[in-house]
Image (cartoon, rainbow, N blue to C red):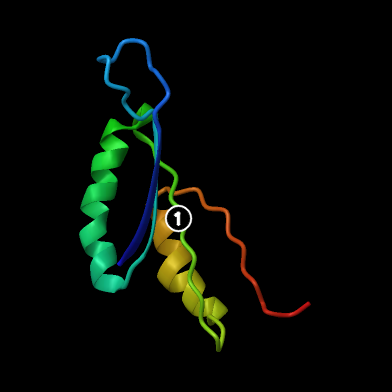
Amino acid sequence: MVTNRTCDHSDSGNRPAQPWPTAYRVEFAANRDQVFKAFSAVANLADEASEGRIRITIEATQPQGFDPAWLRNAVEEPLDEADIVTATNQDTGTT
């Protein structure tokens, strides 16, 4: 798993003298098993984040293209059922 992390160490005022990050960003590539293992850590971050919310961006590629019916049934509907508001950008590979 390749990981890239960045933190904003802006002074928050009420924290100890040691600067604590006020923002945290992590980006990684993961297979299915790693995704399942990572979501516990993602949930932990959401618990500590402002308003208990984080932003998740997912990017996946498939050279032969994703079947639109499969995307709807396997990805979009489960997210809808979880009351997750999504914004999708589907690249058809045409210009």
- The residue lying toward the viewer, choosing from 80 and 94, is 94
Q: Amino acid at mark 1?
A: Asp
Task: Give the image location of residue 92, x and y in percent.
Answer: 67, 77
Instruction: Residue at 42% x, 23% y: name it.
Output: 10
* Residue of label 1: 80
- The residue lying toward the viewer, choosing from 17 and 88, is 17
Q: Residue furthest right?
A: 95
The image quadrant that residue 17 belongs to is: top left
Q: Residues within 10 Å of mark 1 (few under 14, many from 20)?
A: few
Task: Give the image location of residue 93, x and y in percent.
Answer: 68, 79
Q: Residue furthest front?
A: 18
- The residue lying toward the viewer, choosing from 69 and 92, is 92
Secondary structure beneath dot 1 equals helix
Q: Residue furthest bottom?
A: 64
Q: Is residue 3 left or right of residue 76?
A: left
**Depicted 78 relative to depicted 6: above or below:** below
- The residue lying toward the viewer, choosing from 15 and 89, is 15
Instruction: Residue at 45% x, 63% y: name it.
Output: 77
Task: Give the image location of residue 76, x and y in percent.
Answer: 47, 63
Task: Give the image location of residue 72, x and y in percent.
Answer: 50, 70
Q: Which quadrant: the N terminus?
A: bottom left
Q: Residue furthest top?
A: 14
